[in-house]
Image (cartoon, rainbow, N blue to C red):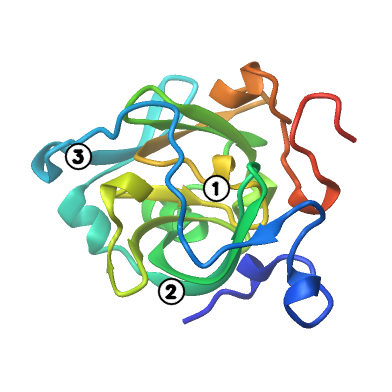
Amino acid sequence: MSTRGFFGRKRPEGEAGRTPPGQYLTKDFPVLSAGPTPHVPLDRWSFTLEHGGKLLGKWSWEEFLALPRTKVTVDIHCVTKWSKLDTVWEGVSFDKLLAAAKIEAPGTHVMAWCDGGYTTNVPVADLAGGKGMVAFRYGDAPLDPVHGGPARLLVPHLYFWKSAKWVRGLRFLDQDEPGFWEMNGYHMYADPWREQRYTGDP
């Protein structure tokens, strides 16, 4: 099943129309990380939803895999200027996570937190309506640890640093706050079509 929201705003047809300004196409999948690749045993892995110190939902690895899945084909765009077209992902959409926790989003933004200490902020509006998921498969295989496995956030219409690797939970926020790269000079929103790479970009 493909989720329409993952495709974002309609773009011109053809590869040129699918590549944001300043990007080049790659057939590879470059590996870029802020630190070493963490390796957490799956029997110790869990995923949580939180707000204001309150736990809203928690799943073990087995429980997470049992949630309703979505499979999508999307283009991805890295702030280091490569784009990769027609990538295939499978995971649990943000909407399905909320449904599984029997909640509505209690804040305007989330802070994704990850193994290794990485964080990044994303508006709820850019996850809901089929726009974001927690992905655990890439192509036809489990997501490789170097690409964020066992699970990573996937928000393909924003620069790829927002698709946080090794994600372990989402903390709902009542207002926007900067994550790791945002505190180090990167844009708070990160729209590749507007080239929002760094603080001060329009």
Q: Depth check: 77 or 51 in front?
A: 77
Q: Is residue 179 above or below residue 19?
A: above
Of labels 1 and 2, the one closer to you: 2
N-terminal-most mark, 3 or 2: 3
* Mark 1 or 3, closer to the camera: 3
**To which residue does mark 2 refer?**
71
Q: Which residue lies under the disc numbered 3? A: 45
Q: Nearer the viewer, residue 132 or 184?
A: 184
Report if residue 53 is visible in the image: yes
Which residue, given by chain and number where applicable, does mark 1 sit on?
Answer: 104
Task: Kindly identify the residue that appears in the image at 49 percent across and 73 percent down.
Answer: 72
Q: Is residue 60 left or right of residue 116?
A: left
Q: Is residue 138 above or below residue 30?
A: below
* Residue density around tag 2, few if under 14, some if 14–19, many if 20 or more, within 10 Å: some
In the picture shown, does residue 103 fall above or below 201? below
Residue 49: % across, % down: 41, 37
Please state which amino acid type lies under the numbered disc 3. Trp
Q: Residue at x 25, y 33 (%)?
A: 38
Residue 96 image position (x, y, % from top left): 44, 60
What residue appears at the point 51 percent right and 58 percent down from the top-left corner?
A: 95
